[in-house]
Amino acid sequence: MEYFLQQLINGLTLGSIYGLIAIGYTMVYGIIGMINFAHGDIFMIGAFVSLIVFLILIGLGVTWIPLVLLLVLIVAMVITAAYGWTVERLAYRPLRGSFRLAPLITAIGMSIFLQNYVQLAQGARTKAIPPVITDGYTLMTSPDGFVVQLSNIQIIIMLVTIVLMAIFAWVIAKTPLGRAQRATEQDATMAALLGINVDRTISLTFVIGAALAAVAGLMFVLYYGVIDFYIGFIAGIKAFTAAVLGGIGSLPGAMLGGLIIGLIETMWSAYFTIEYKDVAAFSILAITLIFLPSGLLGKPEVEKV
Amino acid sequence: MSATPILTVEHMTMRFGGLVAIDDLSFVAERGHITSIIGPNGAGKTTVFNCITGFYKPTTGRLTLTHEDGTTYFLERLDDFRINRFARVARTFQNIRLFTGMTVLENLLVAQHNTLMHASGYSLLAVFMPHLYRPKENDAVELAKYWLDRTGLLAHADDPAGSLPYGAQRRLEIARAMCTRPKLLCLDEPAAGLNPKESEELNRLLVSIRDEENISILLIEHDMGVVMKISDRIVVLDYGKKIAEGTPEEVRNDPAVIAAYLGVEDEEVEQATGGAQ
């Protein structure tokens, strides 16, 4: 029981990170119907920027951790968002209206480019930072001495994710930007005829997705303490899986999918073999898609007339 | 009602490959008038609209839109959203294009996107300082309600747009176009599929938009009951060419128009018009 509870906490933490990344996949798919395969690498960029800014701030002698983390968060979001914007502007916008596979291919190209760029600029070796947020709470101790821990970093990850999700749901439902995104998603031409700058709306979607990925990147750095140029690929594939599992195009679906993938991975590693955790996650995806082709919360594809 | 033109179309030609959809068309839409474009199927009416609203770039020609303050816009040089945002031209479609997944009210708020986006500081205010943004959104909701009331849709404000009956969807499209605060409203067959009672209501709505809101209307319509009753001026197209222009009375009695609609032999037209056409 205690063991299960501990794995539940770990799984939800991991799932939150996947969910934050998955939002970027699902939003972009929703608005322009393409899979942005470079999004995982945007997450990786976010992690690297977080790490670098963190080290710079420490080097400058800023040592009050909450301030450091807040500054890192802001700078990482801004810089990563700029990357997201640039990728869209350079690699996707010129191909909009081209045949369907073209943006997919550039997305994969972008992904490889970003990986190699970071590998060249930062080196191939893993980068580590010492644990920054260390304390936690002991929730319970079992008779045989197993301790259920809820660490502060886990609390922060889950809280930040919940808050960001709430803000984000509000933006989509209630703000002019969210309405413009939904309008563009349904009928971009009509949206333009109503005076909506469709290109800018799409750019902002990439910017928001990248900013959320940056948050996920920072969380990843703080949680695991180790990053390399390749983390974007694995996390990206997982988050993409989460988005598809939840129903690609659906925002609550992306979050739910992220949590499920995180939980499956953790539980499988805890109770079965850690080597096969990815197999477990992807098997669940395959099984779900056989019975629910549009994912858990996705809307069935309706032919536009 | 001043009689300065709001839209001047000069020598507009639109070619698709070898097909000439519009052939050297020139006409003028006066400010505060309802100008109708009629013609048999395939005459190029919708193509004219598509050129005006930036869907197509005309192969040659100039489309000048003039606001009351004398600002002019060359529509053939503006693209997609700028035609609505700056030149203030709104349009509706022959096949209705509402945002069916959104509510009726949201459809009208999307149409006020630019005002709201500006007011909300690109939505940042809406997130971080909602109390500053709220009054501005209320203004937008008021405008939306005003048009819902005018189009008889107030009771449906929170329904999904896709669930409305056909006639109501047509009216909602007009309400949505009006919420962009246009100077020129282009309506593509707004009476299509309406029953006589509904098209009577549409007549009243369009006339009131012209007279009370002082908005110029460009209308494509097959329903002659609507066209003849409310148009100030009619342009008749056939095979992409203008074959007649004038008041409803003049157009109704024009032999070339009758010929185009009834498909009379060319010789007969020449006889009827004394070889003028």
Image (tube, helix red, strand yellow):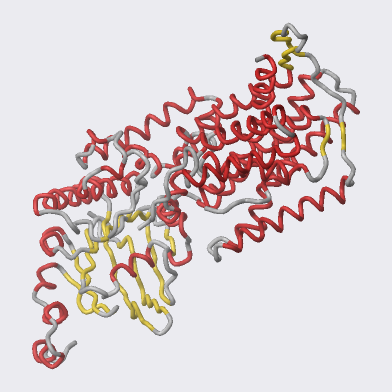
Relative horizontal placement of residue A104, taking residue B169 as reference (left or right): right
Relative horizontal placement of residue A86, taking residue A295 as reference (left or right): right
The part of the image, by quadrant, that contains residue B14 is bottom left
Q: Percent from the top left, x then y, of residue A119?
A: 85, 49
The part of the image, by quadrant, that contains residue A276 is top right
Residue at horizontal 74%, vertical 17%?
Answer: A151
Foreground of the two, B70 or B37: B37
The part of the image, by quadrant, that contains residue A53 is top right
Residue at horizontal 32%, vertical 60%?
Answer: B6
Task: Say which quadrant the C terminus of chain A sits in.
Answer: bottom left
Relative horizontal placement of residue A284, taking residue B43 as reference (left or right): right
Relative horizontal placement of residue A125, taking residue A199 as reference (left or right): right
Q: Which residue lies furthest to the top in this view?
A: A143
Residue at horizontal 66%, vertical 21%?
Answer: A9
Residue at horizontal 54%, vertical 49%?
Answer: A29
Q: Percent from the top left, x then y, of residue B172?
A: 27, 45
Q: Is residue B157 above or below residue A111?
A: above
Q: Is residue B29 above or below residue A56?
A: below
Q: Percent from the top left, x then y, of residue A213?
A: 67, 38
Q: Percent from the top left, x then y, of residue A240?
A: 62, 44
Task: Say which quadrant the N terminus of chain A sits in.
Answer: top right
